[in-house]
Image: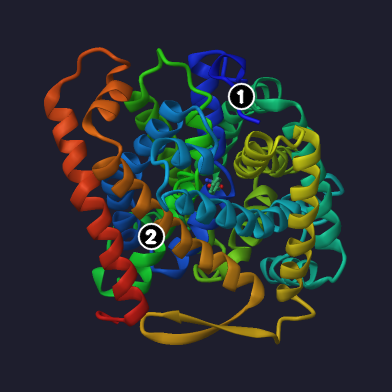
């Protein structure tokens, strides 16, 4: 079944679009993943590369996804089918759906961790613990065979409940209120963290680049994370773009979402790294970094337990507004192309993802010994199944982004792109020319270069 554009569910207001797209972008990527990979890859120099990737590759590709989606008024696969009929371009959408499935399976596991930490904050169980105990507590929790699965399932149930509600009632309503609240809490945490004794070393770590720490793995991680954090390369923003009204300015929407996402990640960095150094935590502690560091900060704050509950609950909500955008990519497709009801597609996809995620979560515990090979920096590295999936998504998203840039740069046609950018009106021609050069050459070449050199290790 194909829906005519007039009967399509869409966002009701300008604030609604930005809130929903920013709700998709802002999530565990900013607050969980950004700090821990920044810690692993050595701080400021990595952040600099990340910022370059956001501006040079991320922003233009977000705009491209919006253009494709709003022009086609379709899901991520249907859009390519309509705009390039009789070609293989729809495979870009197929890749996107596959990536969405993979990402949500580990994303829901980590989101489950945050729910568990809401529980720990309510019962005050880390209030008096020492730093080492907090690390042990986190390690024991993720290695537990059942608890992470339980919380992951709870999280997926919440996600399903929201997606059942459809775009306007579900997605938009929650994003609008809760995202600004998260920002407020993060700022409070950052202030507390930066005023801890010994915090200045953390600030230096974030802002004083040491380029000797950069290698091709770090550059690939920065690029992959730019895609992940902005929700790009798998059709999320194509799908959301298809819900954006014809009168909205796509360029300024993409700019605002990218800036908001980047600011939140940097504030998360300011909340975490000063504390990491103040409490002598290893910056390269990996995926547990946030869960080990912030409880230390809460224990040093007035009303610490209150802030802890609020923080982890809002982090879970931020994860929720991202998870629904991932699920929506697959649901919109099944709904529009196969005519499945929204409920049926949501349930079937969510249950499959929950099962895969439950299996992945064992990689942090019982099946930790099971290692898979991954070609990185010209070398085969061995990783547990959980880390393997996280790393794979860092590669799949840029591949998707590569084809999206090429599609809008070379295939869609100047008139269509100009129409979408200007809403059928006039446009400063310089802006269009720059965008075209970026989409035709700069972004695809940069992606291909980083990608190939990371696999074959040209610069390793
Ligand atoms: N951008 C989200 C985050 O930072 C994750 C995400 C990735 C969402 C890809 C949609 C698509 O948490």
**In the picture, residue 451 is in which quadrant?**
bottom left
Q: Secondary structure at mark 2?
A: helix
**Residue 368 percent location from the top left of the image:** 71, 81
**Residue 377 percent location from the top left of the image:** 37, 80
- Relative to 177, residue 366 above or below: below
Along the viewing direction, whichever of 356 and 112 lies nearer the viewer: 356
Q: Which residue is mark 2?
A: 222
Residue drawn 51% across the image and 48% down it: 30
Residue count near mark 1 (Cα–Cα under 10 Å), binned few <14, some 14–19, many ≥20: some
Q: Is residue 419 visible?
A: yes
Q: Earlier in the sequence, mark 2 or mark 1?
A: 1
Residue drawn 33% across the image and 40% down it: 59
Along the viewing direction, whichever of 36 and 398 lies nearer the viewer: 398
**Residue 348 percent location from the top left of the image:** 79, 48
- Relative to 309, residue 176 above or below: above
**Residue 223 percent location from the top left of the image:** 37, 58
Q: Which residue is mark 1?
A: 3
Mark 2 and 1 residues: CB-CB less than 8 Å, in contact? no
Q: Residue furthest left?
A: 430
- Relative to 458, residue 308 above or below: above
Q: In the image, is 214 to the left or to the right of 168?
A: left
Q: Secondary structure at mark 1?
A: loop
Q: Is residue 196 visible?
A: no
Tag shown at residue 257? none
Along the viewing direction, whichever of 414 and 16 lies nearer the viewer: 414
Q: In the image, is 166 to the left or to the right of 290?
A: right
Q: In the image, is 167 to the left or to the right of 59?
A: right
**In the picture, residue 456 is in which quadrant?**
bottom left
Residue drawn 49% across the image and 22% down it: 244
User: What's the distance in space between the residues labelled 2 and 1, CA to CA?
Assistant: 38 Å
Residue drawn 63% across the image and 38% down it: 337
**In the picture, residue 448 is in which quadrant?**
bottom left
């Amino acid at each position: 079944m194909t829906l005519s554009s007039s009967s399509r569910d869409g966002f009701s207001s300008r604030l609604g679009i930005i809130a929903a797209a920013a709700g998709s972008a802002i999530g565990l990527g900013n607050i969980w993943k950004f700090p821990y990979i920044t810690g692993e890859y050595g701080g400021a120099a990595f952040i600099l590369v990340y910022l370059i990737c956001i501006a040079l590759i991320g922003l233009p590709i977000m705009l491209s996804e919006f253009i494709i989606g709003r022009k086609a008024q379709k899901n991520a696969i249907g859009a390519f089918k309509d705009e390039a009929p009789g070609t293989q371009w729809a495979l870009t959408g197929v890749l996107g759906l596959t990536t969405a499935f993979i990402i949500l399976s580990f994303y829901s596991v980590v989101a489950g961790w945050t729910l568990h930490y809401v529980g720990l904050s309510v019962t005050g169980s880390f209030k008096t613990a020492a730093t080492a105990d907090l690390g042990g507590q986190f390690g024991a929790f993720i290695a537990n065979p059942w608890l992470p699965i339980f919380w992951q399932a709870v999280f997926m149930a919440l996600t399903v409940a929201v997606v059942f509600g459809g775009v306007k009632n579900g997605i938009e309503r929650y994003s609008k209120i809760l995202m600004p609240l998260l920002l407020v809490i993060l700022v409070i945490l950052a202030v507390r963290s930066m005023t801890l004794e010994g915090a200045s070393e953390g600030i230096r770590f974030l802002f004083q680049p040491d380029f000797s720490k950069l290698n091709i793995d770090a550059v690939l991680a920065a690029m992959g994370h730019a895609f992940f954090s902005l929700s790009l390369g798998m059709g999320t923003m194509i799908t959301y773009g298809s819900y954006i009204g014809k009168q909205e300015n796509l360029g300024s929407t993409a700019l605002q979402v990218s800036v908001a996402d980047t600011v939140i990640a940097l504030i998360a960095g300011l909340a975490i790294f000063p504390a990491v150094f103040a409490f002598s935590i290893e910056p390269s502690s990996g995926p547990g970094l946030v869960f080990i560091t912030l409880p230390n900060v809460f224990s040093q704050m007035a009303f610490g337990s209150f802030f802890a509950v609020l923080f982890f609950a809002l982090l879970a909500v931020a994860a929720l507004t991202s998870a629904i955008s991932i699920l929506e990519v697959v649901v919109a497709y099944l709904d529009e192309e196969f005519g499945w009801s929204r409920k049926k597609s949501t349930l079937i996809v969510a249950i499959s993802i929950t099962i895969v995620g439950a299996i992945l979560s064992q990689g942090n515990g019982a099946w930790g010994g099971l290692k898979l090979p991954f070609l990185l920096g010209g070398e085969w590295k061995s990783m547990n199944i959980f880390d393997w999936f996280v790393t794979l998504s860092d590669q799949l998203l840029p591949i998707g982004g590569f084809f999206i840039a090429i599609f809008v740069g070379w295939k869609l046609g100047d008139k269509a792109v100009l129409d979408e950018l200007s809403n059928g009106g006039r446009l400063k021609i310089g802006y269009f020319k720059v965008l075209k050069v970026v989409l035709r050459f700069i972004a695809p070449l940069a992606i291909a270069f980083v990608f190939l050199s990371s696999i074959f290790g040209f610069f390793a």
